Amino acid sequence: MKITHEVQISSDKDAFTNSREALATLLKQEMISVINLKSDLELINYQNLKNFPDYVLSLSHTKGAGAAVLAKKSDYKSLGIDIEWSDRNLKDEASRFYRHPDDSPFYQNKLELWTMKEAAFKALSPRGFSGVLVLSKIVIKDGEFFTHEQPSIRGRVETYLKKVDNKNLWVAIAYTT
C-alpha cells in the first residue's frame, strides 16, 4: 500500500469530525467499514488505531477542514500531515520558532515551510527522538527532513496547494520508512 491521504472540507463540522471523516474515507478504500467515528477510530499515541493495528496514520485540522494520511506499518514507520489555509497570517517574527539556518532557501513561502515543519514534527515524534523536539530543530532541505541531533532519522516531505472554491489550502505530507 502506498501512502494515501484525504482532505475533508466542511465549515459546518468541527475539526474532530472533519479529520475522522477523512480517515474513514481512507479506511473505506482499504475495505474497512467505520460505523462510529469516535469508537471505531480510537487513537493510540496519535499515530495508531486501536482497532486497526496494521496501519499508521496522522491527522490534521484547521478551521473548516480536516485531513488524514494513512499507510501500512509494514511500509512506513511514521507519518505526518498538516493543513493550513493559505490566507493565514504568519508574522515574520514567528520564524524564530520554526526556521532553521540550514533550511533550503527554496522554501520562501512562510506558510508552506510551516506546514512542512508541522508534518515533519508529527513524523519524527514517534521515532524515539531524544530530548525536546521543536520545529526550529527540524531541517527541511530538498524535500528531506532531519535534525542535527539525530541525523540518522530522516524522512521525506512534500507540499501542494489544494484549491477549495476561491481559497487555497496548503497540504504537507511527511513520512519515514
Image: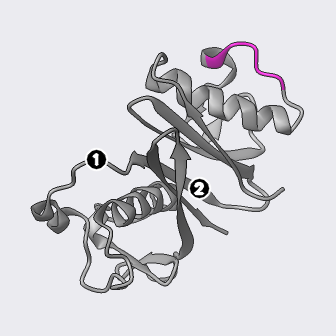
* Picture residue at 74% right of the left edge, 54% below the top: 73
Towards the viewer: 110 or 4: 110
The stretch of residues the image draws in magenta is: 33-37
Colour style of the rendered protein structure: one colour
* Picture residue at 60% right of the left edge, 63% below the top: 175
Mark 2, Cα crowd under 10 Å, few <14 / some 14-19 / many 20+, is many
Mark 1, Cα crowd under 10 Å, few <14 / some 14-19 / many 20+, is few
Q: Earlier in the sequence, mark 2 or mark 1?
A: 2
Instruction: For marks 2 and 1, give the one nearer the viewer.
Output: 1
| Residue 23 occupies quadrant | top right
Q: Which mark is residue 79?
A: 2
In the rendered image, residue 20, in percent from the top left (x then y), is placed at 60, 27
- Circles 2 and 1: CB distance less than 8 Å? no
In the rendered image, residue 130, in percent from the top left (x then y), is placed at 37, 66
- Is residue 142 shown above or below 42? below
* Picture residue at 75% right of the left edge, 14% below the top: 35
Image quarter (top left, top right, bottom left or bottom right) of the N terminus: bottom right
Instruction: Name which residue type carries label 2.
Output: Leu
39 inside magenta stretch: no
- Is residue 14 shown above or below 2? above
Chief secondary structure of the magenta portion: loop
In the rendered image, residue 147, in percent from the top left (x then y), is placed at 38, 77
Instruction: Say what secondary structure mark 2 lies in.
Output: strand
In the rendered image, residue 122, in percent from the top left (x then y), is placed at 46, 54
- Is residue 42 shown above or below 104? above
* Picture residue at 61% right of the left edge, 25% below the top: 42
Q: Which mark is residue 88?
A: 1
| Residue 160 occupies quadrant | bottom right
Spatial distance from mark 2 to mark 1, Cα to Cα?
Answer: 24 Å
Left or right of 75? Residue 68 is: left
Instruction: Name which residue type carries label 1.
Output: Arg
Image quarter (top left, top right, bottom left or bottom right) of the C terminus: bottom right
